[in-house]
Amino acid sequence: MFFRRAREDRAFREAQRAGHALLLQLQATQPWRDFPEPTAPVPASAAEESAVSDLPPPELRVPPTQEVAGLMMRWVQPLVVYGEVRACPECGAYRDWIVFCMRDDSIWLRCRAGHETKESGLDAAWYNRNSGPVDRFHPTLEAGLRHLGH
Ligand SMILES: [Zn+2]
């Protein structure tokens, strides 16, 4: 009994398998009318490309503030603090500064001759009000100075 039963089951499963294979064959050759043709999925690489192209080019990417030593901008006109024109204590220069805003929010002035003076009358808030948006990262101070024309 048991063996006969098993044989019947095997025959049934084989018939089932054959029917399933036939069904797959039909699906492969005849498109189902009720289902629309699936739209081709967007290749992942194309999606990534469009995402990347939304980012600015690498030279315009700005590292997080905690990774930079400070910010710098050129200040060509005389710099007036509390109504006084700031002059370099070493050489007397009073214009064409590089203004640094360091990570500790201190402001430093650097004259054309390279003398650096801390300017306690100014702070990071002043710097942010007066500087443009940070659009460039310089790997070294020298590179930054060169870029700003010093
Ligand atoms: Zn100087």
Image (cartoon, grey):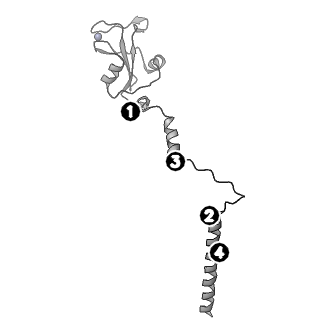
Q: Residues within 10 Å of mark 4 (few under 14, many from 20)?
A: few
Tag nearer the camera, 1 or 3: 3
- For label 3, the residue is 44
* Circle 4/circle 3 CB separation < 8 Å: no
Q: Residues within 10 Å of mark 3 (few under 14, many from 20)?
A: few
Q: CA distance from mark 1 to mark 4?
A: 66 Å
Q: Amino acid at mark 2?
A: Ala
As drawn, the label of residue 28 is 2
Which of the marked residues, 2 or 1, is nearer the chain's N terminus?
Answer: 2
At which x and y percent is residue 33? 71, 58
Which of the marked residues, 4 or 3, is nearer the chain's N terminus?
Answer: 4
Which of the marked residues, 2 or 4, is nearer the chain's N terminus?
Answer: 4
Which of the marked residues, 1 or 4, is nearer the chain's N terminus?
Answer: 4
Q: Is residue 131 above or below residue 93?
A: below
Q: Amino acid at mark 3?
A: Ala
Q: CA distance from mark 2 to mark 3?
A: 26 Å
Tag nearer the camera, 4 or 3: 4
- For label 1, the residue is 67
Which of the marked residues, 2 or 3, is nearer the chain's N terminus?
Answer: 2
* Circle 2/circle 4 CB separation < 8 Å: no
Tag nearer the camera, 2 or 3: 2
